[in-house]
Image (tube, rainbow, N blue to C red):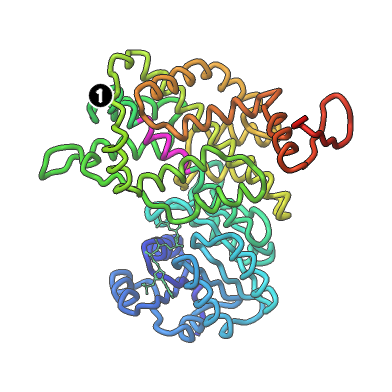
Amino acid sequence: MGGKNIGLIGLGVMGQSLALNLQRHGFGVAVFNRTPQKTKEFTSRHPEIMPTYSLEAFVRELDTPRRVLLMLTAGPAVDETIRALTPLLSRGDVVMDGGNSFFQDTERRAQNLEAQGLHFLGIGVSGGEEGALKGPCLMVGGPTEGYGQVSRILTKIAAQADGPCCEYLGPRGAGHYVKMVHNAIEYAIIQIIAEAYDFLTRAGELEISKVREIFDEWNHGELGSFLFEIAVEVLGKMDEEKRVPLVTLVSDRAGQKGTGRWASQNAMDLGVPVPTIDAAVAARNLSAMKDERLNAAKVLGTSRPPTSRFHAGSVESFRAAVEASVIVSYAQGFHLMSRASEHYGYSIPLGKVARIWKGGCIIRAKMLDPITHALETEEPRNLIVSTEFAGRLIPLDPKWREAVKQAKAAGIPIPAINASLDYCDAYRSERLPANIIQALRDRFGAHGYERIDKAGNFHTNWSN
Ligand SMILES: NC(=O)c1ccc[n+]([C@@H]2O[C@H](COP(=O)([O-])OP(=O)(O)OC[C@H]3O[C@@H](n4cnc5c(N)ncnc54)[C@H](OP(=O)(O)O)[C@@H]3O)[C@@H](O)[C@H]2O)c1
């Protein structure tokens, strides 16, 4: 037996698309799925792909060293499948997890599989169903020897943008760490788009078709990106039955599957401020509390946007606020990866991350060109102080503040845009009020404090 270049386990949305992508690029593919009916249906539509109905038969179809890609629901499904699969594999075989696994689960699995002589790669896959089919962005972590066994396949099926959007990003959980931050930036940008939509429709009382035009215009400038492109599409979709924009009929509760929250939690653990990402996660949590919101609207009343504050310049102010906040979202994500890279010993090549994000993935954007350039030429501690982005943020500043002022006056919540401005203001503050924080802590808990005029640790009896 043997003969297939790669085996894929998990024929969900992503697994099916990746199997077709692999097959289209000339690779022999065998597939296995927990529910056999799905395997049968899928391979009857695509007879070039080899169906298997037991893990034993699946493994028998593969060339050695075997290459197995798991596309499963993150969590116990991955552990269960690995437990059943690994006794059937041989030393030197490669197991890849392409799901959205938590990077610390990947660390644990990498250690266990390495001890069995297997190579385990944690691969962040971005681009959704369409990307998986036509060319995803692949963020690979694991042993270099294992990557050597699969790089030819992965680079071929990946999107292309100045080269394949597939890179080796470091050992163990590095790939899944980068994917987690990618998703966190995605949370932030989606929230920023939602805030602009909210402001323009509620404070500006603009028709959805007008907001669509505005977003389309923005998408042709510095904000050009996949997320703005699909926002234009979404706003243009009409409900055929009711003849209104479909988006107005969509429930206003958003879920969060974990990656944004994980990034926020991990950033807290590492002491890296990512308030725009935190705000985006919190905004989704708040949106999910529909009953409580309805009750609070009755008790506290909702603020009625005074339309008079909205004027011709408001749209441009908001565009500036959105551009600045998107820059800050990327900056926080890269800042977090830079700290994590040191902390976990990943040595993540940040310039390469920015380059592969230019194609295939959900946060692909025109802005990633200058981000790649800034990271590769300057290696700034934070993108917002790079020559390129400081040069962009400074002129955006007055309009950004104006937009925040207008939204506040109109009672429109803009947590991500606001958090981004506060972040910038705090990050560039020569002096922050942490002096009184230190003093208060010393007053109630005798924690001690440092002084600016002499070295050492001091304690004062403040109440006298
Ligand atoms: N959808 C996206 O846009 C996207 C983008 C990037 C990454 N991802 C990640 O890619 C992975 C797959 O996503 P998807 O959208 O393809 O999910 P999906 O459509 O829900 O498919 C899940 C797959 O996992 C299998 N599975 C679930 N529990 C299992 C278990 N206990 N044992 C064995 N198999 C099990 C399912 O098998 P059955 O058919 O038997 O249920 C199915 O094949 C996830 O980790 C997801 O987070 C998704």
Q: How many marks?
A: 1
Q: List the single residue furthest toward the front.
A: 464
Dot 1 corresponds to which residue?
205
Query: What secondary structure do most residues of the magenta stretch adopt?
Result: helix
Task: Indicate left or right for 264 with 191 as reference.
Answer: right
Position of 62 relative to 165 (above/below): below
Tell me the residue at 43%/20% (across/down): 405
* Residue sitting nearer the eye, 322 or 154: 322
Q: In which quarter of the image is ligand 1?
A: bottom left
Q: Does the magenta stretch include residue 444?
A: no
Q: Which element is circle 1 on?
A: loop
Give the magenta part as a residue range.
186-196
Q: Is residue 195 magenta?
A: yes
Q: Which amino acid does label 1 sit on?
A: Glu
Tell me the residue at 64%/42% (across/down): 272
Task: Indicate left or right for 303 with 381 as reference.
Answer: left
